Amino acid sequence: MTNDRKNKKDEQLEIFRVHDKGEKLTTNQGLKVSEDEFSLKAGVRGPTLMEDFHFREKMTHFDHERIPERVVHARGYAAHGEFQVYESMKQYTRAKFLQDPTVKTPVFVRFSTVVGNRGSSDTFRDVRGFATKFYTEEGNYDLVANNMPVFFIQDGIKFPDIVHAIKPEPHNEMPQASSAHDTYWDFVVANQESAHMTMWLMSDRAIPRSFRMMEGFGVHTFRFVNDEGKAHFVKFHWKPTLGAHSLIWDEAQEIAGRDPDFHRRDLWENIERGNYPEYELGVQIIEEKDEFKFDFDILDSTKLWPEEDVPVKIIGKMTLNRNVDNVFAETEQVAFHPGHVVPGIDFTNDPLLQGRLFSYTDTQLIRLGGPNFHEIPINRPVCPFHNNQRDGYHRQTINVGKVSYHKNTLWGNTPAEASVAEGGFKHYEEKVEGRKVQARSESFADHFSQATLFWNSMSDAEKKHIINAFQFELGKVHSESVKQQVVDMFGNVNLQLATEIATYLGLTPPKSGISNITKTSPALSLENTKKTVETRKVAVILTDGFPESDVLFVLDALKSSGIQPEIISENFGKVVGNKGTELEVDNTFETTNSVLFDAVYMINGSKTSKKFNKDAAYFIDKAFSHYKPIGATHEGIKWFEVNHFVGNPGVVVGNDMRKFSKEFKEAIAAHRHWNRSVV
Ligand code: HDE
């Protein structure tokens, strides 16, 4: 490993790494094994003997290989990296890892879908988890975030209900990884606080192009507390330096079959190639005195703080630069918890956050089999830890000595509590008083204003996608009553939206809605994200006899901007240019598909076959209908003309290679070209 990727966490993990290659096979007791093909039998055709300890150990271990998958966020993928703050945040927080711009804090990030099983596909419509463990000098800090800034419910006690409703229905365990079924939508109409989150779920945010092109949000309001004990409310954001981009639904569904590992493969491959994903950490800060200045309750997790009203201050950057060595040991066994905080970061009374503070440790106890999961290498802090907790399943630490209680005199009352000056965590002394009640604050009652704000902020294309998503999902719902209730409910968000859903489903459109919100928040639209070309994948369709000097010029131009071209042809092996240059074919029309690329460049060559033509036509047609940038030079141009592609937005043709390369790159930076005439 290169030195720049070595850090304290990596050094710690190194102690646990085992390299089996080239070694002799042994039992777990270290005994060398002389036979691993045949069990011990009474005669060559006789029964296996109980005495065969190697067989028993091997089989028993195998029989116990599985642990329960996470009850939500089961399908995940992770990578290592580091975080560096741009400038000291001393004014707001005493968190040590946010003080010194020269300090690199090791991090481990796990991305996930929420609903699907561990073996489901990456691209289903869903919320994505974005959980980061910072291995700081003061202990682990976990920022357990999602790629959407709001949530379905306002109180943690309802979490089992929303999860039961959105997971496959229990009587037949269908559908997998999807909210497109009766129980989810029944939950929505019966729990209208879910309106805003449902808008996000029906939007393009729910089908990201890549984990590398996805924002992250801490969702809850947390607290920063500085050295003087002064607190500010804070919301956390991750902003990918590549911008935030999405797939479209038809493509997402097809990818789910063609490459269920689409997102994990994208993350893995780009890290392997040195295209390290980067995310800037942003914070929105509100002074305590301004707690009630907003037209929503800042403790309500179904609300976001519009970035135009409360700007996001960018405070640092995280770079993911190393893949895991072993998915089970690291990605599967990592245990996140929003309650893992460090001095300077504290909680608020957000009732959803309060519920989470209980749930995460509890779930690890069953999932990881006991209270010692903090000792699993990926979960260990990089700073020392000492306390009087003892024993339990799988304990590895050997605590030396006879004292395991507080207070004591035998050891001078150690391990000793640390004062704040010594780095001890002190809970923020928020003044709280009230009656014990089971109720929700009236200030949480408005479920529609921000759902409308979100709708208003979408571009025309994004609005169309949201309408289509509702139509698709409700088209899968059987209950007429639930469907009509959804239409009526979303009339309160926007009448056009509800009417289009109703018309499609043959239901009665609502006559009026309650929302009169006209405000927009441009930051919510993906159209306003960063336009970048780096790491985009371009399929280059070639066959023998291609005009090589021109093609090589374009390939160089693409690569010099960080674009990743792949040669696609009929067969594997080499394609030969008109002057004899050979290019290796990366994939064939059988092994890949245009849905796995950001753009397609079509050249062909002088030696096309009937099959090549048919396959290439299918490939390019689909890219066109998915609004992707497509380009053609030479023979390819004829195709574009015959198919009436030319003249459409994002369709670049020409035989001036310099001009073509420039315009094609601009088309790639735009991501998709929505005002194309696609039938
Ligand atoms: Fe989670 N959530 N959650 N959650 N959550 C879990 O913990 C829970 C919520 C999030 O990659 C579980 O270790 C409750 C919001 C992520 O390992 C569980 C409530 C947000 C991950 C749990 C919420 C999240 C989880 C399942 C409502 C965004 C994956 C396995 C009160 C801010 C972490 C596990 C990973 C995982 C409970 C709501 C994010 C059951 C009770 C809001 C990214 O403990």
Image: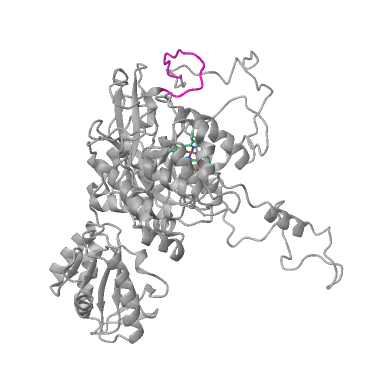
| Residue 141 visible, this angle | yes
Q: Quadrant of residue 225?
A: top left
| Residue 282 visible, this angle | no
Q: Determine whether, in the image, residue 396 is placed left or right of residue 48.
A: left
Q: Residue at x 38, y 37 (%)?
A: 150
Report x, y in % for residue 625: 29, 66
Q: Which residues are magenta?
A: 427-441
Report x, y in % for residue 103: 35, 35
Type of colouring: one colour
Compared to residue 603, the image places residue 359 above or below, namely above
Q: Residue at x 67, y 32 (%)?
A: 391
For residue 301: magenta? no
Report x, y in % for residue 7: 43, 42
Q: Quadrant of residue 631?
A: bottom left
Question: In front: 230, or 74?
Answer: 74
Name the image quarter holding the C terminus: bottom left
Compared to residue 3, the image places residue 390 above or below, namely above
